[in-house]
Amino acid sequence: MESIGELKKVNMQLSQRVIKKIPPQAGLVIPDEKLFSLPEKVLQFGTGVLLRGLPDYFIDKANRQGEFNGRIVVIKSTSQGSADAFEKQDGLYTLYVKGIDNGKMTEEAIINSSVSRVLSAKEQWPEILQAAHNPEMKIVVSNTTEVGIVLTDDDIKLSPPHSFPGKLLAFLYERYKAFYGRDDSGMVIVPTELIIDNGDKLREIVVALAHKNKLEDKFIQWLQSANHFCNSLVDRIVPGKLPDADRKVAEEKFGYTDDLMIMAETFRLWAIESSSERVKEVLSFSKTDEGVAITADIEKFRELKLRLLNGTHTFTCGLAFLAGFETVKEAMVDESISSFVRKIMMLEIATALDGNAITYNEACAFANQVSDRFRNPFLDHKWISIAMNYTSKMKLRNVPLLLKHYNKTGTVPENMSLGFAAYLLFMKCKPGLDGQYYGDAHGKKYAIQDEAASYFSGKWAMGNIDTFVNSVVSDKGLWDADLSALNGFEVAVKENLQLLQTQGALATLAGKQIKTVA
């Protein structure tokens, strides 16, 4: 067997042939050759990094554990990019998982062997339709962005149809004909596009498109009864390709080059909505990773993500930025910011969420995962990016939490009021000569990308903090609620805003005697 050093010298590109020459080594998962002969069971619309870093990750893991035993036919639908890299590497690619898991730093590189082949919809449509004749083919997965799930006047007789729903309908119609409309030939269809009720919406569009194309009633009946369209929610940060320097280090370490190498954080979630036993049976890869959840209602997972991940970002954003931190990971190194994050999640947001659908313990468990994700040293998530559309995020994500907290406790949430005050100070801005609104922190200007920038520029021009805060928190048009009616909230916001202006964010945090979290 060639040594790693010898492999480095010849600079081998990842492929099935090279797999045989890579010696076992710590930190690298190498697939067994027998996985290459597994049958094709999944049709995947999209070659993007989210699909490769999440659904394909789960399927590959299950294959290696002898559970799912199926590979993926990937459909490349856009004109961007090329399938050549996949062809050169026999569909293999390295997924570098890097982050913090249960408080511990973890790194693992996995050579993913789940992709059988990548087909171009534009150039290989007959081959894609032929895949509908495969009795093992049972699953459709997609990520075509939110724009992909729309109804158009598509003609499914085109080669290929223009839209994703058109392509899917053409494939399902081909399958219906191939298996003479048998109930057991239906597919489990799981879109991962980031829209609510994505499965329900895709089903409605596909059925409407079938009527537009004047397809027979028996097919439409089969389409609706034999196929399972499942709503799903995905959550994993997959930044994509590693920075060039990091990729070169990885390739030097493992002894091969990989044009498709991507990185993902350790956290992963794919919540799939179904109560069907057949769906659970078909999606058997769910058995091998706790990150896949098949449940009758995925709303709990959506609420946890929206409130604890996104909501905490929004409450912390202004505070961390005004404290001088550029990225989330930099801020989490600071004890005052990381303590604020834990307190607002555990003592206030988790308390607000506690109820029949989500228990306090479930919320705290998710909060611990969020804390690990925020600390991930491999992700460069900038606060100024998180601050885009700040006002709408505060309204949609956090005002409901504030109201729930008051309904449950009747007390002022000290951390929420501080986070809200920091948001108000972040939104202190003036128009520039270019028409853009700018704030000022530490003597440097920053652009405010927010529809309410003009509103806040006018409010801050009032000059008096008491008048300013009262005018904003009592604005029902802005919040769909009068926040001044919440006992003590307006006073707390005023006090925090004055402290932030006179002492600065870090000194304000340091001087706060707020409850601690064990």
Image (tube, rainbow, N blue to C red):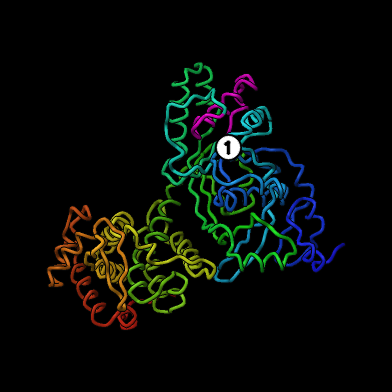
Q: Is residue 142 visible?
A: yes
Q: Nearer the viewer, residue 504 or 402?
A: 504
Q: Residue furthest right?
A: 1
Q: Is residue 189 left or right of residue 328?
A: right
Q: Quadrant of the N terminus?
A: bottom right
Indicate whether residue 292 is drawn in magenta.
no
Residue 303 higher or lower than 132, as above or below: below
Q: Amino acid at mark 1?
A: Val
Q: Residue at x 58, y 37 (%)?
A: 140
The image shows residue 50 at horizontal and vertical percentages of 54, 51
Quarter residue 503 falls in: bottom left
Residue 140 higher or lower than 19, as above or below: above
Q: Residues within 10 Å of mark 1 (few under 14, many from 20)?
A: many
Q: Residue at x 31, y 81 (%)?
A: 513
Q: Is residue 236 left or right of residue 470?
A: right
The image shows residue 60 at horizontal and vertical percentages of 67, 50
Q: Nearer the viewer, residue 122 or 194?
A: 122
Q: Quadrant of the C terminus?
A: bottom left
The image shows residue 39 at horizontal and vertical percentages of 72, 38
Residue 480 higher or lower than 11, as above or below: above
Q: Is residue 392 left or right of residue 133?
A: left
Indicate whether residue 170 is drawn in magenta.
yes
The image shows residue 133 at horizontal and vertical percentages of 67, 27
Does the magenta stretch mainly form a helix, a strand or a loop? helix
Q: Residue furthest front?
A: 433
Residue under numbered circle 1: 140
Magenta span: 160-187
Q: Residue at x 61, y 31 (%)?
A: 125
Q: Nearer the viewer, residue 513 or 165?
A: 165
